[in-house]
């Protein structure tokens, strides 16, 4: 019971300033009296007494006021759950005169309340202050006490903060000391011989007999003589306890007016995503007909019972986010010093024109944001203007007015309707206890189906899946979810669908069709040149990349079937020489094949991609050019010119080979001459062997001279042929 009393005092403080003054002054007087009377009491008992005093003072003050607001319960009457994980809650009640109401929320929900709260006081009433307990950071709160417990200080850390305070100390040896805290110091102490020194904290005191030092570990108790300092320590510990226990917050609403009128409270908070579950019942007599039953699975995870409420289940993805509005924010402020002591610093001034321009940009951006918000939130039909006294938590609430409209019809069965880009189911008279879940029927309609055997080689390489194409003829938006299929008065299998708007169709598969076989192993890929031209020495080719897949379908059933083949759709490829598919997705082409009983059919799917390729004739490999010159799909004029290019390139290669051969001979002769010269250095010049080596060396020199002459002729011929080749190719253009 401690927490509500403190919350109430905080709420009153935010609403009635004069009451705050009285309560605070009496609270201080009462606290001061209790401090002197119970200085040695335990902290919990002292805190309880303080809170009881506060409650008594508030009760007296409330009785002293000439006008007392009625406290009324405002129960929840309508809930809108969105598939994006949030819910809009509407509370409605009838009040007379001035009134107040209080709702309890989880602490983590307060940010959503502050962001989305919308209030209405109809029939001439007005909305007053919305008050709630502050959520100051614990560190900020603790730093305001004389003894700071922010960093969980040790005993020595606490004593260091009370320097100058009077204390009574009792040691473990039974000594009792009274003195003033001089400080706490750390010393290195050797506890035992031959043991390393350890750090110990010592409390230094100023006593009547002089300075005394006591090891903190040797103290049995330390009592603060200063009552106010003891109170500060107690309050700091109470703040730590409250921060640990404050899981819920009370928000107080005030309404002012005369006579009887209606008030509404609306807000958006995080809720469990509502889910859907379907049952598809096939018709044994007519396979084109079936009935679909849809259930909405909802959870009431709030702290309020839903008693006879209107429940709206909205499908869609409205954007939602959390912003920390509850946590107090503090800005760093500059430290100002007296002018006579302030040193001059270089000043940086912003340009005035730039500042004006930026201000205009901000204004324009804000205006644009507001206009966009109004445009996006505008409903399909115009709604009446809000009643006088209505207060909104911000712009863009036009769409929310649909939920706050007291004239909205409540149906005993689920009804569906469009809300802008969203779709909702409305269920009337729903009762669901807090922390409970329920299944609610929202769809019971006939749908059109076509039974299919769906084959995809990536799903199963041999058998297709038993399935159907279901067309949403319910006129309602079907949210994604599982589907249990029943056929022939028995369970047929499970399926799953994504979101299906009205009028659209989706495929379902719920079993394996063992009476149908599909062989999809025959896959062929090839490429061929279909056209070519030469433009200024560049060969431009059009190449067809072709993919062919053959599906051999065999039926072992006694009844005809429709087999849906899902053939992979290759990126950039187009179908050719293939029947038009029944539909195409981003990954597959779908072909429907009517398969008679116990027969075979073949489906060939061909896809083609035309690739443009450019090849420089000068730099192209001779084998590549020779291949293109013999390709029959290329025009004969182009092939003839390519053949001439090949001929000229072949002549160049012959000359280069001859030059390369001569260079190789030069290298071989040079190596042999080195060998001959080494031998001649070791042989007497008058011997026959020396004369033979000399003759051999002379013959090689003659061969070198002849080779050089031949190489020079080949080099000149190569240069000439290269020039002719370059001139021919660079100016070559033919189609």
Image (cartoon, rainbow, N blue to C red):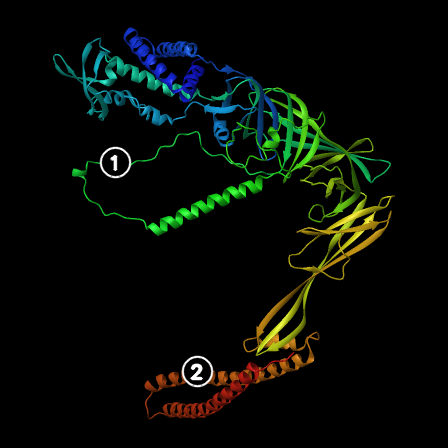
Closest to the camera, between mark 2 and mark 1, is 1
Q: Position of residue 661 (x, y in %)?
A: 50, 84
* Residue located beneath label 2 in the image: 667
Q: Which element type, helix, strand or loop, lies under badge 2? A: helix
Q: Is residue 161 left or right of residue 474?
A: left
Q: Position of residue 356 (x, y in %)?
A: 37, 49
Residue found at x 59% / y 71%: 614
Residue found at x 38% / y 83%: 674
Q: Is residue 273 visible?
A: no
Residue furthest top as drawn? 37
In the displayed structure, 349 sits above or below 723; it is: above
Q: Position of residue 162 (x, y in %)?
A: 23, 20
Residue found at x 41% / y 17%: 9
Is there a contact, CB below 8 Å, between mark 2 and mark 1? Answer: no
Q: Quadrant of residue 654?
A: bottom right
Most foreground residue, 697 or 226: 226
Q: Which element type, helix, strand or loop, lies under badge 1? A: loop
Q: Residues within 10 Å of mark 2 (few under 14, many from 20)?
A: few
Q: Quadrant of residue 195?
A: top left
Q: Residues within 10 Å of mark 1 (few under 14, many from 20)?
A: few
Q: Is residue 483 left or right of residue 694?
A: right
Res. 508 mark: none
Most foreground residue, 523 or 571: 571
In the displayed structure, 472 sits above or below 520; it is: above
Res. 335 mark: 1
In the displayed structure, 227 sits above or below 588; it is: above
Q: Is residue 486 visible?
A: yes
In the displayed structure, 363 sits above or below 434; it is: below
Q: CA distance from mark 2 to mark 1?
A: 88 Å
State which tag comes first along the sequence, 2 or 1.
1
User: Split into 4 quadrants, where in the image is the N terminus?
Assistant: top left
């Amino acid at each position: 019971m401690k927490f509500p009393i403190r919350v109430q005092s905080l709420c009153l403080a935010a609403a009635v300033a004069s009451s705050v003054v009285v309560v605070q002054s009496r609270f201080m007087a009462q606290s001061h009296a209790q401090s002197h009377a119970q200085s040695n009491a335990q902290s919990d008992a002292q805190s309880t007494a303080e809170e009881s005093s506060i409650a008594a003072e508030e009760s007296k003050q409330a009785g002293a006021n000439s006008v007392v607001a009625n406290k009324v319960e405002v129960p929840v009457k309508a809930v809108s759950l969105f598939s994006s994980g949030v819910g809009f809650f509407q509370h409605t009640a009838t009040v007379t005169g001035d009134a107040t109401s209080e709702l309890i929320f989880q602490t983590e929900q307060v940010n959503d309340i502050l962001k989305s709260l919308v209030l209405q006081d109809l029939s001439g009433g007005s909305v007053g202050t919305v008050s709630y307990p502050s959520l100051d950071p614990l560190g900020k709160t603790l730093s305001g006490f004389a003894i700071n417990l922010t960093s969980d200080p040790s005993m020595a850390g606490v004593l260091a903060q009370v320097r100058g305070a009077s204390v009574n100390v009792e040691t473990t040896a039974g000594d009792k000391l009274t003195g003033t805290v001089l400080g706490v110091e750390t010393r290195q102490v050797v506890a035992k011989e031959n043991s390393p020194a350890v750090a110990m904290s010592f409390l230094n005191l100023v006593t009547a007999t002089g300075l005394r030092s006591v090891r903190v570990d040797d103290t049995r108790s330390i009592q603060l003589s200063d009552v106010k300092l003891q109170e500060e320590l107690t309050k700091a510990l109470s703040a730590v306890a409250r921060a640990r226990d404050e899981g819920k917050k009370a928000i107080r609403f005030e309404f002012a007016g005369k006579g009887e009128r209606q008030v509404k409270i609306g807000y958006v908070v995080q809720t469990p995503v509502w889910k859907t579950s379907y049952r598809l019942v096939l018709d044994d007599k007519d396979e084109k007909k079936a009935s679909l039953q849809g259930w909405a699975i909802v959870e009431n995870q709030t702290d309020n019972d839903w008693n006879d409420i209107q429940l709206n289940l909205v499908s869609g993805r409205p954007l939602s986010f959390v912003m920390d509005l509850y946590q107090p924010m503090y800005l760093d402020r500059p430290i100002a010093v007296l002018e006579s002591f302030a040193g001059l610093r270089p000043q940086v001034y912003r340009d005035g024109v730039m500042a004006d321009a930026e201000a205009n940009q901000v204004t324009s951006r804000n205006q644009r944001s507001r206009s966009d918000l109004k445009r996006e939130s505008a409903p399909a039909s115009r709604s009446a203007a809000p009643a006088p006294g209505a207060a909104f938590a911000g712009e863009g609430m036009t769409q929310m007015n649909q939920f706050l409209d007291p004239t909205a019809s409540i149906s005993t069965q689920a009804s569906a309707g469009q809300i802008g880009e969203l779709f909702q189911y409305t269920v009337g008279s729903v009762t669901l206890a807090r922390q409970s879940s329920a299944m609610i029927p929202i769809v019971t309609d006939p749908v059109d189906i076509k039974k299919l055997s769906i084959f995809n080689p990536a799903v199963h390489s041999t058998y297709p899946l038993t399935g159907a194409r279901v067309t949403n003829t319910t006129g309602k938006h079907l949210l994604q979810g599982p589907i249990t299929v029943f056929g022939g008065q028995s369970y047929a299998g499970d399926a799953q669908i994504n979101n299906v708007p009205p009028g659209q169709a989706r495929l379902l598969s719920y079993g394996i069709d063992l009476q149908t076989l599909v062989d999809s192993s025959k896959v062929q890929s090839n490429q061929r040149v279909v056209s070519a031209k030469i433009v200024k020495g560049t060969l431009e080719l059009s190449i067809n990349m072709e993919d062919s897949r053959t599906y051999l379908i065999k039926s072992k059933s006694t009844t005809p079937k429709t087999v849906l083949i899902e053939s992979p759709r290759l990126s950039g490829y187009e179908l050719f020489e293939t029947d038009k598919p029944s539909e195409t997705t981003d990954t597959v082409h779908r072909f429907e094949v009517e398969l008679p009983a116990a027969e075979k059919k073949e489906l060939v799917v061909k896809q083609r991609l035309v690739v443009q390729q450019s090849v420089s004739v000068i730099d192209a490999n001779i084998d590549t050019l020779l291949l293109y010159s013999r390709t029959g799909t290329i025009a004969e004029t182009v092939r003839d010119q390519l053949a001439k290019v090949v001929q000229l390139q072949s002549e160049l290669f012959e000359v280069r080979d001859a030059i390369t051969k001569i260079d190789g001979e030069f290298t071989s002769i040079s190596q042999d001459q080195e060998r001959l010269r080494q031998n001649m250095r070791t042989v007497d010049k008058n011997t026959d062997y020396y004369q033979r080596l000399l003759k051999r060396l002379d013959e090689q020199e003659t061969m070198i001279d002849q080779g050089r002459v031949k190489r020079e002729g080949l080099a000149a011929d190569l240069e000439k042929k290269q020039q002719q080749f370059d001139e021919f190719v660079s100016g070559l253009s033919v189609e």
